[in-house]
Image (cartoon, grey):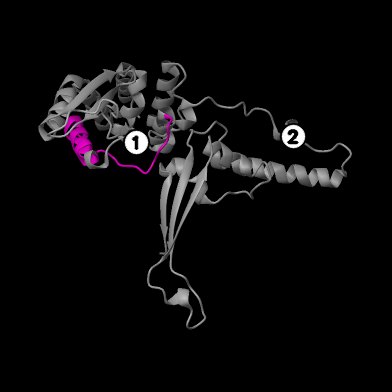
Amino acid sequence: MDETVAEFIKRTILKIPLNELTTILKAWDFLSENQLQTVNFRQRKESVVQHLIHLCEEKRASLNDAALLDIICEDVDLFDMKQFKNSFKKILQRALKNVTVSFRETEENAVWIRIAWGTQYTKPNQYKPTYVVYYSQTPYAFKSSSTLRRNTPLLGQALTVASKHHQIVKMDLRSRYLDSLKAIVFKQYNQTFETHNSATPLQERSLGLDINMDSRIIHENIVEKERVQRITQETFGDYPQPQLEFAQYKLETKFKSDLNGSILAEREEPLRCLIKFSSPHLLEALKSLAPAGIADAPLSPLLTCIPNKRKNYFKIRDK
């Protein structure tokens, strides 16, 4: 990469507030998500910039790439929060005469929205409001579960028009913890959450072994525990997981049998089953299963894919 291009990219990145940097880099779409996940955005900005410049050099960024980043930064600067609020409120008030909308901006380039819904003939119910958090320059918004189902399409339309995005992304992802939802959606959970100290070798950690045990058994246990620890770390990483309370799987399958005349085999409707895993901290619980000897390693991808798929509602059907 040319030195002039490197300097241009460096100066452009330095102008971007650190809390907006991830969003803008994703909008730039020059560096892959895997590359961005190698960057620790919690360190000093100068160190972050140096790492990003190194990644750009590896991909041989051109002057056109640098110019596109500059344009995206200008677009972000042009985002008008006042215009967003006015547009959002107008759309709801046109559709529903009686609706109360309140806003509160935060430091993270987000706006909290409180909506008390009414109808053409009833006043807004202030005791059952809907809460929405929208992050500007992104197609993502987080809403409380109290939203009336009939108002959900109108809410989506208001967010789409006011944010000037083609669509607001709908995800099958729920949690009571906004920080965890945000970390999963923006794929920041390997940087947002504090990391464990992984410098201690496994051999130095307590394995809970009896000192009077046969040395051959001790060796076999250590080898197995090292294997489980390695697979668990490769799967979940060596950092605390985002906090989700459950994962739900809806299964639909046809009964298969070689026996003729089986009642289930002749059934046209698929067999349906609902499985739900719940825990105060589900992902941490799943992460601890194999090391505790409760499950074999590796766990099923259906359990370990939750953060990457960005969903905790799954529908599984026969192919």
Name the residue tied to disc 2: 203
Q: Which amino acid does label 1 sit on?
A: Ser
The residue lying furthest to the bottom in this view is: 260
> Residue 241 location in percent, x, y?
52, 33
Picture layout, residue 128 above or below residue 290: above
Q: Give the range drawn in magenta.
A: 152-177
> Residue 291 location in percent, x, y?
66, 41
Seen from the viewer's position, the closer of residues 96 and 84 is 96
Q: Going 45% across and 28% down the picture, which residue do you hit?
A: 39
Residue 145's disc number: 1
> Residue 318 location in percent, x, y?
42, 64
Q: Going 47% across and 70% down the picture, which residue do you hit?
A: 255
Disc 1 packing (10 Å; few <14; some 14–19; many ≥20): few
Seen from the viewer's position, the closer of residues 297 and 65 is 297
Left or right: 183 as drawn, with respect to 133: right
Task: Residue 32: name its quadrant.
Answer: top left
